[in-house]
């Protein structure tokens, strides 16, 4: 797994912008809100919860994408934890790729129909509010970031997704975990049973720009186009879970 990720890191640090245009906000590149200063995953043994944290040089979660008014080309900003977890640890069927916990914001659509993140009793209007997704990432040279969320044929009846998935033909789940932004940190709290009680794994932290593609089959449905910061510097997944 680590070898696969190191190959990907080499790709995304050497790739320039690829043919498909993006709706990336130009201020993201140098935003201190997206420059990672520290990361951790702490397992609270008493409460049996894992707290994933990314700390930034600025205000974590303050920067969000601007709406473009449509799904196709919709911008997605993410604080992402690539891990060495297996796909089956988080409710997917067995499949190859990098299992990552992505905290995302995207104002043009809502992909958490079971959850009301802004508590206004409207379940489909809060995509801009930071929320989590389990995803399986796979190498994809069609986008400048070198990765995309893994897709599958919607006719394939052998694909297993968690029941909280948003109904898209991708290895993506919308698990509804609590996301907390405060000062320079963004955290997500995950009950251990939602990860099959896996409390020993390696991880890294990344901030990235992603974008939806709903019309062009030459590109992935959700690809990574820019990477702003990597906690380890080389995406080697050197960090381990601390116990409390």
Image (spheres, helix red, strand yellow):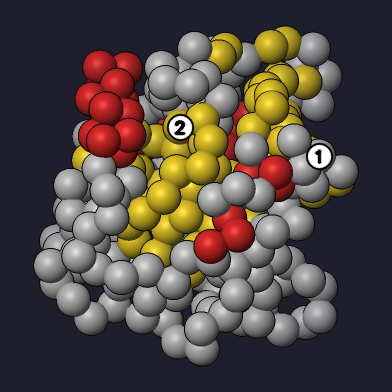
Residue 220: x and y in percent read 23, 61
Residues 200 and 25: in front is: 25
Residue 96 drawn above or below residue 150: above
Residue 196 drawn above or below residue 133: above
Q: Is residue 38 left or right of residue 143?
A: right
Q: Dot 1 corresponds to which residue?
A: 184
Badge 1: residue crowd in 10 Å (few <14, some 14–19, many ≥20):
many
Q: Is residue 59 left or right of residue 210?
A: right
Residue 25: x and y in percent read 54, 66
Q: Residue at the location (60% across, 59% down)?
A: 27
Pick the quarter of the image with the N terminus.
Answer: top left
Q: Which residue is at the far right?
A: 183
Q: Is residue 178 left or right of residue 152?
A: right
Residue 176 drawn above or below residue 82: below
Q: Residue at the location (70% across, 43% down)?
A: 32
Residues 180 and 123: in front is: 180
Pick the quarter of the image with the C terminus.
Answer: top right
Q: Residue at the location (45% across, 43% down)?
A: 227
Q: Is residue 38 visible?
A: yes
* Secondary structure type for disc 1: loop
Marks 1 and 2, how far apart at CA: 20 Å
Q: Residue at the location (30% across, 38% down)?
A: 12
Q: Dot 2 corresponds to which residue?
A: 82
Residue 134: x and y in percent read 47, 46
| Quadrant hosting residue 23 | bottom left
Residue 212 drawn above or below residue 28: below
Badge 2: residue crowd in 10 Å (few <14, some 14–19, many ≥20):
many
> Disc 1 or 2, which lies upstream in sequence?
2
Residue 73: x and y in percent read 38, 76
Circle 1 or circle 2, nearest the eye = 1
Badges 1 and 2: C-beta atoms under 8 Å apart? no
């Amino acid at each position: 797994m680590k070898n696969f990720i190191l190959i990907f890191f080499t790709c995304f640090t050497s790739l320039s912008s690829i043919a498909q245009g993006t709706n990336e906000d130009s201020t993201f590149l140098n935003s201190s809100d997206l420059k990672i200063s520290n990361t951790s995953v702490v397992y609270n043994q008493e409460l049996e919860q894992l707290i994933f944290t990314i700390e930034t040089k600025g205000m974590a979660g303050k920067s969000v994408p601007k709406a473009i008014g449509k799904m196709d080309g919709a911008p997605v900003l993410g604080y992402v934890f690539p891990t060495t977890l297996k796909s089956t640890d988080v409710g997917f069927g067995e499949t190859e790729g990098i299992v990552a916990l992505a905290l995302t914001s995207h104002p043009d659509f809502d992909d958490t129909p079971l959850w009301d993140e802004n508590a206004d009793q409207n379940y489909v209007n809060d995509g801009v509010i930071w929320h989590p997704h389990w995803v399986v990432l796979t190498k994809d040279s069609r986008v400048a970031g070198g990765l995309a969320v893994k897709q599958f044929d919607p006719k394939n009846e052998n694909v297993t997704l968690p029941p909280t998935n948003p109904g898209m033909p991708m290895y993506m789940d919308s698990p509804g975990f609590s996301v907390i932004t405060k000062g320079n940190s963004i955290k997500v709290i995950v009950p251990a049973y939602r990860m099959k009680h896996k409390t020993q794994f390696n991880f890294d932290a990344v901030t990235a720009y992603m974008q939806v593609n709903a019309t062009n089959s030459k590109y992935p449905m959700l690809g990574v186009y820019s990477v702003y910061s990597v906690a380890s510097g080389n995406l080697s997944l050197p960090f381990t879970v601390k116990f409390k």
